[in-house]
Image (spheres, rainbow, N blue to C red):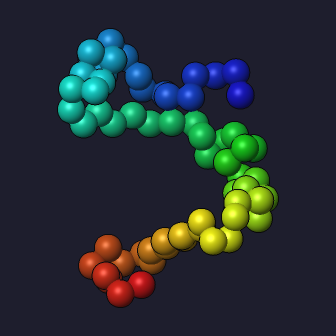
């Protein structure tokens, strides 16, 4: 990936970084290193005893899933 990872990073965000909450859009979902295949390979290499995977559904009010 040759484009900047952060899409909307600017001087104001740079100034506020580490001073509070800063949001930025990114391109990581476009990088093969973050593909489902790469994630599966990473999980397979990671020690099973040190793996804790948390998932969530589509309903933000559902605290049981």
* Residue 10 in the image: above or below residue 54: above
Residue 37 in view (yes/no): no
* Residue 4 in the image: above or below residue 40: above
* Residue 61 in the image: above or below residue 39: below
**In the displayed image of the protein, which residue is found farthest to the bottom?**
64
* Residue 4 in the image: above or below residue 21: above
Residue depicted at 63% across the width and 71% down the height: 49
How many marks overall? 0
Asked if residue 65 lies left or right of residue 41, the reply is left
x then y, percent, for residue 52: 54, 70
Determine the image quadrant of residue 31. Answer: top right
**In the displayed image of the protein, which residue is found farthest to the front?**
49
**In the displayed image of the protein, which residue is found farthest to the top?**
11
Residue depicted at 58% across the width and 37% down the height: 27
Q: Nearer the viewer, residue 47 or 26?
A: 47
Asked if residue 19 lies left or right of residue 11, the reply is left
Residue 20 in view (yes/no): yes
Q: Quadrant of the C terminus?
A: bottom left
Asked if residue 11 lies left or right of residue 52, the reply is left
x then y, percent, for residue 28: 60, 40
Residue depicted at 69% across the width and 64% down the height: 47
Residue depicted at 44% across the width and 36% down the height: 25
Q: Quadrant of the N terminus?
A: top right
Determine the image quadrant of residue 11. Answer: top left
x then y, percent, for residue 24: 39, 34
């Amino acid at each position: 990936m040759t484009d900047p990872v952060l899409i909307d990073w600017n001087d104001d965000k740079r100034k506020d970084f580490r001073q509070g909450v800063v949001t930025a859009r990114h391109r990581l979902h476009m990088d093969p290193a973050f593909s489902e295949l790469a994630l599966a390979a990473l999980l397979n290499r990671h020690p099973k005893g040190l793996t804790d995977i948390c998932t969530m559904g589509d309903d933000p009010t559902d605290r049981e899933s």
